[in-house]
Image (tube, grey):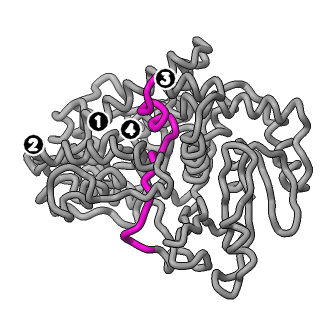
Amino acid sequence: MYLKRKIDLWFDKWKAKTDKKPALITGIRQCGKTESILHFANSNYSTVIYINFWENKNYLKIFDNSLDVEDLVSNISLYFLDKKIIPDKTVFIFDEIQECPRARLSLKNFAINGKYDVIASGSFLGVSGYVINDTTPIPVGYEDIFQMKTLDFEEFLWANHCDNFYIEQLEKCFKNRIPVPDPLNNYMKKMFQIYLCIGGFPRSVTTYLETKIIGDSINVVTNIVSEMKHDLGRRININGESIFKQSEIGRIQNVFELIPAFLAKENKRFVTSKIITGNGIDKANAIEYLKQAGIISKVFNLTSPSLPLEINKISNQFKLFPNDIGMLISMLGNDTIVALSQGNLGLSKGAIYEALVFDSLYKSNIGVYYFAKESGLEIDFVICYEAKATLLEVKAKNGNSKSAKTVLSHPQHYGKTRLIKIGDYNISENDNVLTIPHYLTFILGKH
């Protein structure tokens, strides 16, 4: 079962370019990169050459010597004798390309040659120094890059055969600041509750579509998280040998395991000193590794919730969020998951919904920060929206926004801001305060 993804449209535009470069698709493991690449390739080319450097180390030899395109094509053809390689009708797919730095370097030559389309992908491309002691340069300026993520809520709706008409209705309601009609609002709330429980990993979504049993999908996510933890600390030397010590792997795994506990705390800030073993640099490196691997994100505190936000960030104060809500839910245990699915969760529900809103913001490519003072004033998220500093207050249920009102009423201290309240609401706007339901957060990335 192929799931329609936003990268599909990106691929169509990429192929139509007259000056296209090799495509480079990055993203967390299991987000659907290979499925989308092969779906596009098989639909648009008469010959597809798929090379996976992780599964078959023999392919590394192809790039040992000359990186001239004609030499490479000749050497590749020896591994695919049943394939007819024809310029303009052939696409080369280099999967897990981080395992072969010289294959990535060859993308420059393919870009200059222009006879063949190339799509490269990898799950650890963001990890700096993935191959230790390798000095192969990166072909900067010779790649068209797309960062792929797990399914966002809109893609989840597509998977559930939700007609674009209904998504367009949501957009119209948002644009005109009018309530979503009750039948559509109730349907979206129901779908968002399912998405909250199972997340956006394609395997999880496909399982739900096949069985309609949320528990089956959660088990899939649990297995994916287990696989990820097994692969944490994946980094090799130039001989292809793993170089991480067991203590380093344990530290990285511990960071991941600590995230739910810190998000459940009142201020949610991650405390690096709580990571097991190692000095401060070791612990910071463990966090950075997870971030570079696309598994988690850092959300930094701000000195002031005013533009430009990046300049105001406090580099040693941050929250950590998994980059897919399903990862967090799968780590909470069966009792919590059952309570959540039945709407019976207690105080921790607020932290979960905050992580859920982060999921939507992250997948909408919106830069996310937060604002907190020692006095207790705290804003869940701060973003730049429509070129304005915008406070986001996330509520699991209806509630006041005391901290946000303090910031709004004192522009002389905090700068000029506006507020979006996200919770169990419908759409409304009064006195520079916009309220929207949780499920509509994804639309902030479209307007």
Q: Amino acid at mark 4?
A: Arg
Mark pair 1, 4: CA separation: 11 Å
Q: Amino acid at mark 1?
A: Lys
Local crowd at mark 3 within 10 Å, few (<14), some, or many (≥20)? few
Mark pair 3, 1: CA separation: 22 Å
Q: Amino acid at mark 3?
A: Asp
C-beta proximity under 8 Å, tags 3 and 1: no
User: Looking at this view, is 185 or 317 the one in front?
Assistant: 317
Where does label 1 land, which residue?
229
State which tag comes first along the sequence, 1 or 2.
1
C-beta proximity under 8 Å, tags 3 and 4: no
Q: Identify the residue at horizontal 54%, vertical 72% (top origin).
A: 375
Q: Amino acid at mark 2?
A: Glu
Mark pair 3, 4: CA separation: 27 Å
Q: Identify the residue at horizontal 74%, vertical 65% (top origin).
A: 419
Q: Is residue 141 visible?
A: yes
